[in-house]
């Protein structure tokens, strides 16, 4: 285990943003072959930074805006695994889907670094 406890910085109120919300959806297939989903909304805190920022793509058929953020948090975000779909994160009025999660559980209490892509693609 690493000796540096990065979560001391991540949990610092001067650094941390408490206005994050996660929508987690679990999809199950019933005995009748149909899927049912259970949705849970969870408030969490983390350090949010720009990843690629907001980018305007100009295409032959029009324009679209895309962007991404990075979230460092002790909350275990997921990009989808098993019956759980990728988490949907809301921050500052924008909605993002978790596309990549790196686990840094070996640093003190542990944390994850998640890349989140802007939803919906808008033009």
Image (spheres, rainbow, N blue to C red):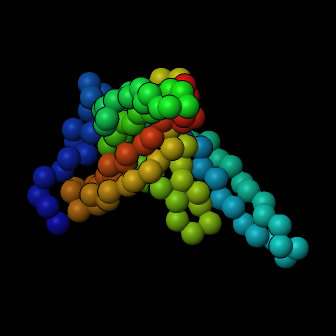
Q: How many marks?
A: 0
Residue 85, by quadrant, is bottom right
Q: Position of residue 93 (x, y in %)?
A: 53, 23
Residue 80, placed above or below residue 97 = below
Tell me residue 2's x, y (percent): 14, 61
* Front residue of 93 and 111: 93
Q: Quadrant of residue 52?
A: top left
Give the side of residue 111 with respect to residue 92, left or right: left
**Residue 30: x percent and y percent?**
81, 71
Residue at the extreme bottom: 31
* Picture residue at 38% right of the left edge, 28% below the top: 55
Q: Which quadrant is the N terminus positioned in? A: bottom left
Name the side, left or right, on which 95 lies relative to 11.
Answer: right
Query: Can I make out residue 59 in this image?
Result: yes
In the rendering, at what x and y percent does residue 72 appear? 32, 43
Q: Where does the C terminus fall, quadrant-wise? A: top right
In terms of image quadrants, where is residue 13?
A: top left
In the picture as drawn, the residue positioned furthest to the front comes out as 60
Specify the farthest residue to the left.
3
Q: Is residue 64 visible?
A: no
Q: Viewer-proximal residue, 76 or 13?
A: 76
Question: Which residue sits at x=59%, y=61%?
Answer: 84
């Amino acid at each position: 285990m690493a000796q540096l406890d990065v979560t001391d910085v991540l949990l610092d109120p001067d650094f941390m943003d408490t206005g994050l919300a996660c929508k987690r959806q679990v999809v199950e297939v019933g005995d009748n072959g149909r899927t049912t989903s259970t949705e849970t909304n969870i408030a969490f805190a983390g350090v949010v930074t720009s990843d690629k920022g907001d980018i305007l793509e100009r295409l032959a058929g029009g324009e679209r805006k895309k962007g991404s953020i990075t979230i460092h948090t002790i909350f275990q975000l997921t990009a989808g695994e098993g019956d759980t779909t990728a988490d949907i994160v809301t921050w500052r009025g924008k909605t993002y889907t978790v596309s990549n999660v790196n686990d840094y559980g070996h640093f003190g209490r542990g944390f994850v670094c998640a890349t989140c892509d802007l939803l919906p693609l808008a033009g």
